[in-house]
Image: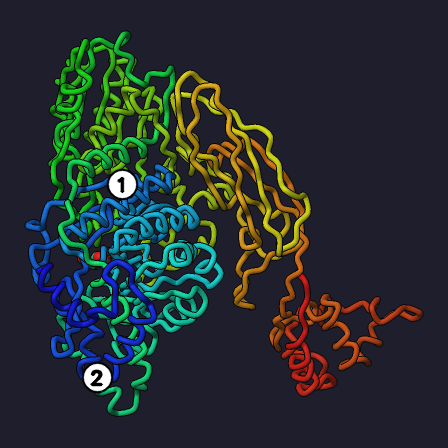
Amino acid sequence: MRSLSLVFIILVIGSVINAQNTDVVDIDSKVSQLISELTLEEKASLCSGRDDWSTQPVERLNIPWIWLADGPHGLRRAPATNKPGYGDQIPATCFPTASALAATWDLDLVYDVGVAIGEECQALGVNVLLGPGVNIKRSVLGGRNFEFFSEDPVLSGEIGAAFINGVQSQGVGTSLKHYVANNVETMRMYMNSDVDTRTLNEIYLVPFEIAVKKAQPWTIMACYNRVQGTYGTQSPYLLTEILKDKWGFEGIVISDWFAVVDRVKGIKSGMHIEMPGVNLVNDSLIVEAVKNGDLDEATLDELVKEILTIVIKAKSLDKENIDQNIVGHHKLARQVAAESITLLKNDNAVLPVNKKKYKNIAIIGEFAINPRYQGNGSSEVKPTQIDNVLDILEAEYGDGIRITYAQGYKLTDDNDFSLIEDAKKVASKADIAIIFAGLPLHYESEGIDRKHINMPASHNKLISEIASIQKNTAVILTNGSAVAMPWINEVDAVTEAWLGGQAGAGGVCDAIFGTVNPSGKLAETFPVKLEDTPSLFNFPGEEGNALYGERIFVGYRYYDERNIEPLFPFGHGLSYTTFEYSNISVSSETISDKDDLIVSVNVKNTGDVIGKEVVQLYINDKESTLTRPKNELKQFAKVELKPGEEKEINFILNSRDFSYFDSRRNLWIAESGEFTISAGSSSRDIRLTKTIKLQSTQNIPVAFDEYTFFKEYWDNKETRELLKEIVPNWIRGWTPKGKSLDEAEIPGFFSDHPMIKLPYISNGEITSEQVFELVEKSKNITFTP
Ligand code: BGC
């Protein structure tokens, strides 16, 4: 297959394109030439795939096809492009899933994972990896939460960008998915994400924006769902106005598998390739639309040009004889798993396991021999090997200690408590019980949302029962998304190990024995109960509509606003050492929206062991025209410190970090006023704050129309002048004797009406013409917010 592709590429671009160093200009001219030679039918054919996993070639012109394969936490390559790819795919390294990757908050490490997956793609002939997924975890119930990074847009976007840059550094493209507001699995082919424009721009679009601007993914995958009533595969607002025009996306858009509804509308909106390629009906609809004048051929040409650019680039970067490096990548997978381990609770320093203190260790729970390491659905990777905790412990940590094991629960029956008594016997004879529990595979899946956040009853009961007879009890959780912990006060330690991939067991052992000091932090809030969650009343949605009623208050923004104590807050994660924050300083206490602001913070390791801390920088706008969250994460940095070591961390903020999205003006606005900048170890563990003043120089339109209230026209200095000019008699009538017009006392009755109603309210004395004259004149008026 690879050598055949190479023949294609040599024929197509020959000396024009250097295999290593793609010359953009030459690709452009080659593409223009191909466009002139392609028939209309051939052009339409290039706008859908050839089969499940490849794009359409045009052999007559030696246009090659490229291979697309899932992602995201490892490569799921089918034996052939026309095979479904479930079950018999080629083994590849299964890295920890997205929840775990995000919990590392480590952009360099995520980049390395991208590089490794990119290498495996090259080794197995894949040109584009279908991932990463940067959809926001809007609800704890989201069936695919394990496959997405975070509830926070900045964290999701930064992790996504690092991953993309890693994969693409290997000459392999990515597909950033699922664009956009794809946050529910129920009715996923039809559900309308009923999200207001401000929320869409401030929360759901942001991770895509960051990833596009920082990493330029070769492709973006348009979602199944509708957004504001329009399918993601045919939305001019999303695909053209925002993606291309605003963000400068240079790649191509492909549809999620079977996500296309109206193909011609899709072409007009900028949706390049329909996947998978089994629907020839749509190709002929494109041809027909051009022939009957409904679709301008130039629009089609533009898309085909962009498709060919990516295809030719992809083929030119194909590498020969790349080693899949499964040994090296397994090691990396273990390192990532260890870095993602999030220590949620550790009373009495029960962890790390101290071999001098704990000679008899009870390992309880079937996950210790039969690990749950990834989620269900299209992201399922066939691993190259799977480690388990018992084997790792015996091989690497067993010296000088006695390890006993009890199954504790059955993976197949959530309510079977028959194994608990055996487990108690084992635990009662040990110095410490380490329980492996969490969510079995059928609890989290693409295509299905969760109905609750409970672990199986058998797991919960097992934990309580063991804790009742063993005072040293640590729980190690395996799950891709938040769970309730009714037993939280009964155990000393809880460690979140996520879905740790094929080498997850080694990562967990390293963390609980202290070879690696845990440094993971929650990328999602763990609520006490489902009833506390932001989208409770609007998830999954009803009658095909998912109302985003919590608006911008997603994740921790909601818990903060409502003053709800979560079980574990966003950004939380303990360490075996402690960190002290000091000396927050800013480059200037007053800035304008044109300035960058440098924020510096010192962090010191005040404990006895080496450790890593994730310093999180949050912003709060003290007073704002629009409601804003109490805390918004803007930056973060992970830093490693030896005992006693101290480092200064610098963050650079710009006006966008201080801005909100104004949907009336379709604009980001950095409003003048005071902002608090906080550095914290979690969203609820703020260590230092600093207040700065922003003096905006932005000039923004008043954006008034005939529905704007009289009061708003009056309150703005310049539109007030227009009122004085256009309806002077009225203003004069309201002005007390001897006072200036500016001191007019506008009756509340007038103030509270939109201008369009004034002719009616004034009994016709203010005319419609005067109102529209005012509206027209105010269009040119701007002000500084
Ligand atoms: C999923 C995508 C996946 C595609 C191909 C779809 O059902 O939503 O994430 O990439 O299938 O497997």
Which mark is drawn over residue 37?
2
Label 2 lies in ligand 1 vicinity (Cβ under 8 Å): no
On the image, the x and y values in percent for residue 648 come to 53, 32
Q: Residue at x 19, y 69 (%)?
A: 14
Q: Is residue 429 above or below residue 18?
A: above
Label 1 lies in ligand 1 vicinity (Cβ under 8 Å): no
Q: Is residue 580 above or below residue 83?
A: above
Q: Is residue 372 visible?
A: no
Type of amino acid at the residue the image marks with label 2: Glu
On the image, the x and y values in percent for residue 2 come to 11, 59
Q: Which SS class for mark 1?
A: loop
Type of amino acid at the residue the image marks with label 1: Gly
Q: Earlier in the sequence, mark 2 or mark 1?
A: 2
Say left or right for 659 vs 288.
right
Foreground residue, 404 or 708?
404
| Displayed quadrant of residue 588 | top right
Marks 2/1: CA–CA distance: 50 Å
Q: Which SS class for mark 2?
A: helix
Q: Which residue is mark 1?
A: 480
Q: Residue at x 31, y 48 (%)?
A: 166
